[in-house]
Amino acid sequence: MSRRKQILGLALLVGLMALTGFLLLRDQPVATLLETLSRIHPGYVLAGLGLMVLYEGCEAMSTRLILGRLGYNVPYRRCLGYSFVGFYVSSITPSSSGGQPAQIYYMARDGIAAAHGTLNMLLLAVCYQVTLLLYAGTAWLALPGLRAAMGLGMGALLLLGGGVLTVLTAGMLCFLFLPGLARRLAEGVLNLLSRVGLIRDRAGAGEKLARQMAEYAAGAACLRANPGLLPKLLGLTALQLSVQFAVPYLVYCAFGLEGYALPLFLGTQAVVTLAVCSLPLPGSVGPAEGGFLTAFTPLFGAALATPAMLVSRGISFYAFLLVSACVTLAVHLRGRGRAHAAPFLSPARPVPSR
């Protein structure tokens, strides 16, 4: 991502943070808020930051597994660097659009073929989306109190987020496992968009579709050649999301509260995440904070809901954004790393199963 885009992204993020802070805290007496925050047990806050490190560690392990199947011997610490880069750049770009290209760039700088870096990000995205949908869907069905607490506004956001993610996930799975059907559907959509004038360069769009189809074919071939890979990736992704969704529970404990169990917090945060994940805002700033207040007020109580939101988002997003920025800078300054690749492997011919 260019420096100009980074500056614009950061400016938008800071603006959203300022507006969100004003809207959410304008009726909160500062002295009362500070007194409430002073009652927090700091050990739980540190534990929450540790969970976020584990969150990145799970993605790094998934990356190492995928690249290993493609013939690369990449140190775990380097995969961890890629994950932190993804978190930082995703957080400062609308719809998290810049994270994956940034990770692919730094992988390529370390000698990993761009096609293989793209394949890695594709498989990670599929596993993340499938797991989030299953997680949030299960929570929605199992927690009737949560459904009642969401209200009309958050319910609409949840319907939007769930619908968008379902369509994207279904499309990605179709491209992976039903390529013939996917190609016909995609060609039909391109033809329709071309007729109504939304696509002017039909040939260029067709070439882009062909490249994407090749990437999905490579992903499907990799999964077929390594049948144990997908369950491992899904398991790591489930752990990754679970540790992130557990942060509000640690905040609950930090305030000395008790009475509600961990699974309730996991499910509630899963639903909030699904509701805001498709919004074109850096870090979902604004809706994420509002969604937290809507969904978690019954658990924390009206008096503690806002302080809990500040601490929870502070751990899982704002503080970790600073940590990720520092790691990203270190990765950038490290310079071109030496290649860790085995002899080049075509994405259409993944290595044998291990």
Image: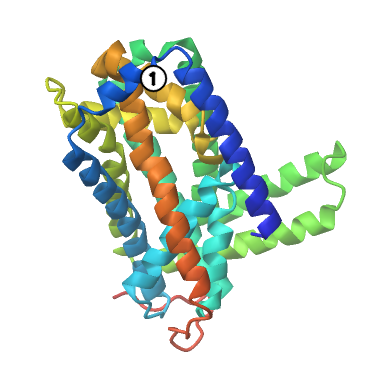
Q: Is 113 rendered above or below residue 277?
A: below
Q: Nearer the viewer, residue 74 or 144?
A: 74
Q: Residue at x 41, y 72 (%)?
A: 67
Location of residue 57 by image quarter = bottom left
Classify the position of the C terminus by image quarter. bottom left
Classify the position of the N terminus by image quarter. bottom right
Kind of residue indicated by mark 1: Val
Residue 140 visible in the snapshot: no
What sort of colour scheme is used for the picture?
rainbow
Q: Nearer the viewer, residue 261 or 219?
A: 261
Location of residue 246 by image quarter = top left
Residue ID for mark 1: 30
Q: Is 148 rendered above or below residue 12?
A: above
Q: Residue at x 54, y 54 (%)?
A: 99
Side of 90 where 239 appears, left or right: left
Q: Is 313 rendered above or below residue 112?
A: above
